Image: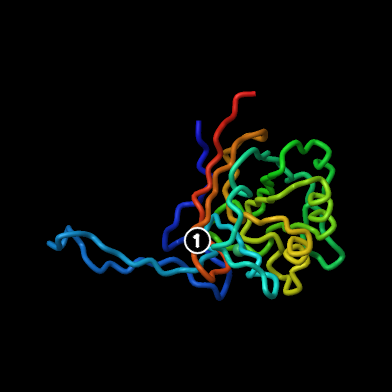
Amino acid sequence: MLHDITPRITSELKVFPGDTPPSREVLLDIDRGDHITLSTLRGTVHLGAHVDAPSHYTPGGDSIEAFPLDRVLGPCQVVDVSGAIIETEEGRLVVSGPWIEGLETPRVLLRTGTHPDPDRWSEDFAGLSAPLVEELAERGVLLVGIDTPSVDPPSSKALPAHQAFARTGVSILEGITLAAVPEGRYELIALPLPLEGFDASPVRAVLREVSS
Ligand SMILES: [Zn+2]
């Protein structure tokens, strides 16, 4: 059985303030008598479920065509961290890590529940702390996925979590929808397009149930 953890891409899908929402320009339309339907997509590459390239957050980082696909293909674990969210001194919401002891896979998908509707922008979603990213890296985690638009809370310009991902080389999958997925182990499939020079790519992220 497959769980689709990709939000639907519509003109309603919310992107970071200032980023480009998705839109469709119809060049030809069978229903208007054209011989085919043909349309152009315009929008940020950080669209819905997407993988960030290191070039998005670190100088000289690889762009998305060089992304190692084995990061987003293989055993993963969905963990509900909604009970592990704390507020920092600066008033930012971050995930803390008591659940780390139960990790068994090199990919972990975190359900914070703090950005429940991809079509409604809200500023108060939870991110990750730099020490948490470093601890995950020490435990051999290669990829962290999160059900929010970013691993850093939106008010943060310093991007401490992204910087920790840059230091450790752990990869980032953002914008997935995990509300309907039970905790546990799955096979993750979330391949980015080889968009040369780009800083991210949308993915169709799915979880395949594994027999235990
Ligand atoms: Zn992103």
The relative height of residue 72 versus residue 54 in the rendered view (above or below) is above
In which quarter of the view is residue 172 placed? bottom right
Asked whether mark 1 lies closer than 8 Å to ligand 1, one says no
135 horizontally vs 185: left or right: right
Residue at screen point 84% across, 61% down: 88
Q: Secondary structure at mark 1?
A: loop
Residue at screen point 87% across, 65% down: 89
Task: Using the image as rendered, state which of residue 20 and residue 204 is in the foreground.
Answer: 204
Relative image position of residue 82 (x, y in whole percent) = 73, 46
- Mark 1: amino acid: Pro
Relative image position of residue 56 (x, y in whole percent) = 63, 69
181 horizontally vs 193: left or right: right
Relative image position of residue 120 (x, y in whole percent) = 54, 60
Residue at screen point 61% across, 47% down: 70
Can you identify the residue that label 1 sits on? 194
190 horizontally vs 80: left or right: left
Query: Which quadrant of the render holds ligand 1?
Result: bottom right
The relative height of residue 153 versus residue 113 in the rendered view (above or below) is below
Task: Using the image as rendered, state which of residue 150 and residue 193 is in the foreground.
Answer: 193
Relative image position of residue 196 (x, y in whole percent) = 50, 68
Count the marks.
1
Residue at screen point 55% across, 64% down: 46
Query: Quarter holding the C terminus?
Result: top right
Using a 10 Å C-alpha cutoff, classify the residue at mark 1 as few (fewer than 14 neighbours), some (14 to 19) or many (20 or more): some
The relative height of residue 9 versus residue 62 in the rendered view (above or below) is above
Q: Residue furthest left?
A: 33
